[in-house]
Image (cartoon, coloured by chain):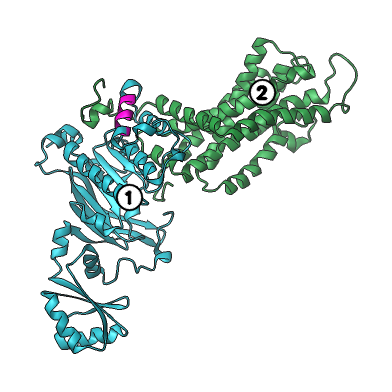
């Protein structure tokens, strides 16, 4: 493909008869998400400021409450709540970034992607990694404020937190993708997503611990994948607090990773389906 | 000729005389629920032909376009592009087609160059080869000097040209265009058609274009006319028009039904009431006009005589005017 000036057969322009590898299109779609994000200044402001605002209100609100006063092993509620707050930020941002799927469809952009000779997983991967990146950045900005409440973590803890945040963000973004793919309006997306979002978060151990919940709620909390995000974050950030052996760190991360893979596969199946209805 | 040589552009451009079909549509039927959008439509498009799909809104041309561009599965029937089936071999089809949609598909937040680079990546193109191809395409559509400006700052005509460059970036052998000149002024429209002709002649690209504009349909080598999902005519514009005998006379009257009946009785001709006008076909129309006006002097308020147009072909085949469809009820779902 060195000399491009002469008209040449299509077979020479395109290297072989296989579908284009998934990495180049996926990277290009990811890059587009980043560029579009950066060029819409209000989104940039939102992503950076919302964790800060959230943090300020949370810190201020909890300033005098729930402080147990006793030093040492006793955990105050703000510390208890911190992993849940982090997951909440990631949860909302992840799912709502996938509103861009609906925008892309409305703006016609998605059509030109869908007639390209690429594997559908490249479309899912590019879009989902785009959303994951944005929401993980937002989560990590929030994490950067951890020292303000006396949470000090080392580099290996930090790496683990990044991994957990990434997995959580990836799974939730893929979930948002799967929901958004079939919907044609932002309001429908809001309606469906709200149905999932709040219960998913409430039952994740973000507000109250699994151990203290009543029987059936405890079951729901155990099957909620988000619980493993919150619990694994808690295990990394406050290792001395975690006495609950049900949520061993490696098991929790394993469950998160499996959940990510499953949701990604669902998003792929949804996007790969062709029908006798108009695609867009 | 083997299937594999049909796939190759070289074969097409070096041997234009050899008959082969770049696009084959056979027995395509499509339904949206109970509504039949396409009813057993079949036609072939030879390599390097500019082929038109002419029809009013709701005629099924957009449905056919969606099926050919692999975006929708037909209810029944088959279609192949360069011998690859649009249902079973969609990746081979996608590799060979360039698609220009009626609706915008460029990302207005990206620059023209960024849009084309992204498009190239979707086709596995990268690096210096892609850079060179993007530059070449932007020059061809006259946007080289605006390459790094965001598409949202472009006029409608310029956005269409980015759209065209996008569809042609990977040198497709077959180009599918859905109403490509929508919203363009006559000059820009002419430019698009000139460019399509160049592509066909210099690179043997097969071009299928949907349109509802008669003047554009006239520029196609061959065309089909679709009406309510049925293929009502297939041929070159000249062939189709020559099927109509002589001239077309259109008479205006306050009571068109009575006038048509009177003409039929007196001259033994088939006079059609189309809308609020009476329409008939006859040889040496200019002479006939004097007879009619004399015979029905009070009833005729205006007369026109013309050579047949594609619209006359449409009327002759369907019995009604191109634009008098009950459009809101029949308009295609999801069409803009």
Does the stretch in magenta take in B135?
yes
> Is residue A259 shown to the viewer in this render?
no
Between residues B113 and A155, which one lies in front from this camera angle? B113
Frontmost of labels 2 and 1 is 1
Q: Which residue is mark 2?
A: A141
Q: Residue furthest left?
A: B17
Residue A249 placement (x, y as % from top left): 67, 18
- Tell which chain the image draws in cyan: B
Does the stretch in magenta take in B200?
no
Between residues A253 and A70, which one lies in front from this camera angle? A70
Secondary structure of the residue carrying numbered label 2: helix
- Tell which chain the image draws in green: A
Figure quadrant of the N terminus of chain A: top left
Between residues B81 and A141, which one lies in front from this camera angle? A141
Between residues A252 and B303, which one lies in front from this camera angle? B303
Vertical order, B307 against A25 (above or below): below
- How far apart marks 2 and 1 lie (CA) works out to 48 Å
Q: Which residue is mark 1?
A: B181
Secondary structure of the residue carrying numbered label 1: loop
Respond whether the residues carrying marks 2 and 1 are from the same subunit. Answer: no
Residue A198 placement (x, y as % from top left): 69, 39
Vertical order, B200 against B318 (above or below): above
Does residue B196 appear to the left or right of A270 in the view shown?
left
Q: Which residues are magenta?
A: B130-138
């Amino acid at each position: 493909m060195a000399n491009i000036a002469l008209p040449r057969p299509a077979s020479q322009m395109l290297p072989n008869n296989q579908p284009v590898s998934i990495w180049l299109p996926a990277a290009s779609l990811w890059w587009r998400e980043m560029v579009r994000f950066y060029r819409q200044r209000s989104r940039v402001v939102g992503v950076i400021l919302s964790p800060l605002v959230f943090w300020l209100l949370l810190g201020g609100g909890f300033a005098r409450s729930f402080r147990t006063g006793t030093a040492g092993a006793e955990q105050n509620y703000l510390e208890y709540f911190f992993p849940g707050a982090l997951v909440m930020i990631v949860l909302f941002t992840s799912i709502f970034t996938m509103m861009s799927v609906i925008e892309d469809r409305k703006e016609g952009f998605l059509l030109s992607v869908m007639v390209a000779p690429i594997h559908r997983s490249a479309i899912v991967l590019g879009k989902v990694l785009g959303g994951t990146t944005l929401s993980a950045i937002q989560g990590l900005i929030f994490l950067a404020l951890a020292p303000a409440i006396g949470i000090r973590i080392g580099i290996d803890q930090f790496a683990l937190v990044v991994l957990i945040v990434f997995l959580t963000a990836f799974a939730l973004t893929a979930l948002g993708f799967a929901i958004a793919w079939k919907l044609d309006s932002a309001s429908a997306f809001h309606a469906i997503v709200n149905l999932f979002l709040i219960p998913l978060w409430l039952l994740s151990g973000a507000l109250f611990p699994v151990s203290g919940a009543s029987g059936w709620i405890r079951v729901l909390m155990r099957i909620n994948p988000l619980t493993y995000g919150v619990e694994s974050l808690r295990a990394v950030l406050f290792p001395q607090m975690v006495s609950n052996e049900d949520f061993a760190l490696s098991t929790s991360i394993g469950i998160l990773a499996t959940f990510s893979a499953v949701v990604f596969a669902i998003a792929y199946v949804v996007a790969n389906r062709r029908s006798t209805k108009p695609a867009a | 000729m083997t299937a594999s040589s049909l796939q190759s552009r070289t074969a097409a451009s070096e041997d234009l005389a050899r008959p082969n079909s770049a696009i084959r549509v056979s027995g395509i039927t499509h339904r949206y629920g109970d509504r039949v959008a396409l009813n057993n439509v079949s036609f072939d498009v030879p390599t390097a032909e500019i082929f038109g799909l002419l029809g009013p809104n709701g005629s099924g041309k957009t449905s056919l376009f969606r099926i050919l561009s692999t975006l929708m599965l037909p209810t029944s029937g088959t279609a192949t592009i360069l011998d690859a089936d649009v249902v079973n071999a969609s990746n081979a089809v996608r590799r060979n087609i360039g698609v220009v949609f009626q609706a915008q598909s460029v990302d207005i937040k990206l620059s023209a160059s960024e849009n084309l680079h992204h498009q190239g990546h979707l086709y596995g193109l990268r690096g210096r080869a892609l850079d060179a191809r993007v530059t070449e395409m932007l020059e061809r559509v006259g946007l080289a000097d605006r390459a790094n400006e965001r598409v949202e700052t472009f006029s409608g005509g310029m956005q269409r040209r980015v759209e065209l460059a996008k569809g042609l970036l990977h040198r497709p052998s077959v180009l599918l265009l859905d109403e490509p000149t929508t919203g363009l002024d006559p000059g820009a429209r002419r430019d698009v058609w000139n460019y399509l002709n160049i592509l066909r002649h210099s690179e043997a690209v097969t071009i299928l274009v949907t349109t509802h504009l008669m003047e554009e349909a006239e520029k196609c080598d061959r065309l089909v006319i679709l009406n309510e999902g049925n293929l009502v005519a297939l041929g070159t514009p000249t062939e189709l028009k020559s099927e109509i005998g002589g001239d077309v006379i259109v008479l205006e009257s306050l009571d068109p039904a009575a006038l048509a009946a009177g003409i039929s009785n007196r001259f033994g001709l088939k006079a059609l009431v189309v809308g609020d006008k009476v329409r008939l076909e006859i040889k040496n129309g200019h002479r006939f006009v004097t007879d009619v006006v004399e015979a029905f002097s009070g009833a005729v308020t205006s007369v026109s005589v013309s050579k047949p147009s594609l619209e006359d072909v449409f009327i002759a085949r369907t019995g009604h005017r191109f634009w008098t469809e009950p459009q809101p009820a029949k308009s295609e779902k999801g069409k803009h």
